[in-house]
Image (cartoon, helix red, strand yellow):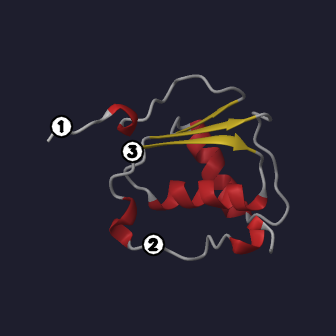
Amino acid sequence: MPPLEDLFEVGVEPPEDGLGNLRMVKIMNFNWRHFEVQLVSFLLRKAKSLHKLQVVSANAALLNVPGVPEADLLIIKDALANGRMMLSGSDDAAIQPFHSEVFIDV
């Protein structure tokens, strides 16, 4: 089986309305791999309604990743500077999922 990096196609663009309701994203165990950085950059570019992107990583500092375009890193740096993206070294409960406690009684 090919490595996960080979299976992950960030270049495939979803329909424009596909990310319209996305408000918060929390990514756990972020390791600064090429495809992870591309995913974060993709979310920041395409999810216009995204208010907070929390990235939890053992290395809570922005790293230069070989093979990642400088434009992707600039998007991440800008998101960190303006507070749209938070980078932390541990999982603080700063962002709780809205869907985890929703039950519909029919």
For residue 14, which numbered disc appears in the image? 2
Under circle 2, the secondary element is loop
Which residue sits at x=45%, y=30%?
A: 96
User: Mark 2 or mark 3, which has the lower sequence index?
Assistant: 2
Query: Relative to 11, is 27 above or below?
Result: above
- The outermost residue toward the right is 66
Left or right: 90 in relation to 94: right
Separation of residues labelled 1 and 2 (CA atoms): 33 Å
- The outermost residue toward the front is 106
Few, some or many residues within 10 Å of mark 1 (<14, 14–19, 20+):
few
Under circle 3, the secondary element is loop
Q: Which residue carries the number 1 mark?
A: 105
Left or right: 105 in relation to 67: left
Which residue sits at x=85%, y=61%?
A: 66
Q: Identify the image quadrant of residue 61.
A: top right
Q: Which residue carries the number 3 mark?
A: 23
Type of residue at label 3?
Answer: Arg
Of badges 1 and 2, nearer the viewer stands 1
Type of residue at label 1?
Answer: Asp
User: Mark 3 or mark 1, which has the lower sequence index?
Assistant: 3
